[in-house]
Amino acid sequence: MPLTKYSILAIQFAKLSGFSPIITTAATPHISALKDLGADVVVNRSSPTILKDIQAAAGKPIDYVVDAVAVPETTKIALEVGQPTSHILTALPFEKDVDRGEHTIAEVFGIVSYPHNAELGKKLFFDVVPELLVNGHLKVSNSER
């Protein structure tokens, strides 16, 4: 599975925002690229002990989880890895029958051409993003999604 545009941006913006540690899951071929983008730890997504691996890497309770893939398997991990009241950001809506518990769940819907996002979109694409690209804080990466 290729890296998603969402995971590429989420890692970089989390790093720029001061979140630490940034822990992600991926297939072995993507480990180096994700670390270059700002991930502190990359856990093998095929690990039979993935939840324990992520929690051990965090070394503290996990308050924020990003589900950049948003398929049933990753949704399950997102709900189980954090605290019962953690905040989860997801690329797609959770399925209706998923028990959300006490988690705060937000879907990312960043279409900047929508009227309610237009002002933010102009600021991002004309002021913020170009500066982040020029100074190397935001990196472009190939993805297929």
Image: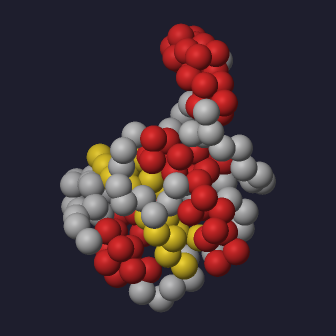
Q: Quadrant of residue 123?
A: top right
Residue occupying image coordinates x 65% and y 25%: 130
52 versus 39 height, above or below: below
Question: In this rendering, would 55 be left or right of 108?
Answer: left
Q: Residue at x 52, y 51 (%)?
A: 11
Q: Residue at x 64, y 21 (%)?
A: 125
* Image location (x, y in percent) of residue 89: 42, 47
Q: How many tags in the picture?
A: 0
- Which quarter of the image is occupied by the N terminus? bottom right
Residue appearing at x 61%, y 33% in the figure: 135
Which colouring convention does the figure follow? secondary structure
The x and y percentages for residue 3 are: 68, 59
Residue 114, quarter of picture = top right
Residue at the front extreme, as displayed: 135
- Image check: 34 left or right of 39? right
The residue lying furthest to the bottom in this view is 48
As drawn, 83 above or below 17: below
Q: Is residue 61 visible?
A: yes
Q: Nearer the viewer, residue 115 or 137?
A: 137
Q: Position of residue 61 (x, y in %)?
A: 22, 64
Instruction: Where is residue 79? Give x, y as percent.
Output: 35, 63
Q: Position of 23 compared to 44: left or right?
A: left
Q: Work out whether residue 71 can be spotted.
A: no
